[in-house]
Amino acid sequence: MKRRIISSAHAPQAIGSYSQAVASGDFVFVSGQIPLCPQRMQIVGTGIEAQARQTFDNLQAIASAADATLDDAVKINISMTDLQGFSVVNDVMAEYFSTPYPARACVQVAALPKGALIEIEAVLEKRGR
């Protein structure tokens, strides 16, 4: 199966040896996104709500570059440094997705790159496109 690299100038450039996303067949695998401003490459906000919004904005930009939307997500994985903010992230997520929602996992981790409070990765399925 042929792979295609997906890249968006409206999302942060990779800060390591990985692509923003890779399309393979009907699927798009979006690398973990943190709340970086694409222009400044700095963390946006100090609280979980602002950071979650920026992270979902970054995911949305990459999905758009793949000719998809977040509603094409079939699975997302969320890593947070403090699960006390889980309900806030859940509320923000509901603003970015329509029902039926994708499958999801959410785990607490000790630390994330650049001191981020949240990181989200996604798998999108683009059937028939």
Image: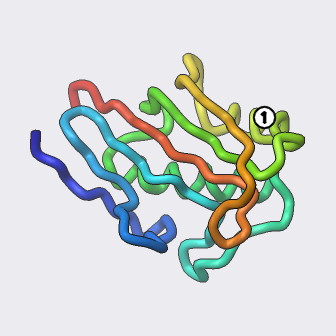
> Picture coordinates of residue 78 (x, y %)?
63, 41
Residue 34: quarter of image: bottom right
Q: Is residue 28 left or right of residue 109?
A: left
- Residue at position x 62%, y 38% from top? 96
User: How far across and down, in percent of the image, does residue 67 sit?
Assistant: 32, 45
Colour treatment of the image? rainbow
Residue type (three-letter) at the residue carrying disc 1? Asp
Label 1: state its secondary structure.
helix
Q: Which image quarter holds the N terminus?
A: top left
Name the residue: 39% across, 35% down.
124
Q: Please identify the quadrant where the C terminus is shown.
A: top left
The percent coordinates of residue 31 (x first, y second) are 44, 53
Give the residue at x 69% y 38%. Answer: 107
- Residue on which the image places disc 1: 91
Residue 42 lies left or right of residue 32; in this view the side is right
Q: Quadrant of residue 103?
A: top right
Q: Is residue 28 above or below residue 51?
A: above
Q: Quadrant of residue 125?
A: top left
Q: Is residue 61 left or right of residue 47?
A: left
**Residue farthest to the left, as pictured:** 1
Q: Position of residue 90 (x, y in %)?
A: 75, 34
> In the current view of this chain or complex, which residue is farthest to the top?
100
**Is 14 situated left or right of 51 in this image?**
left
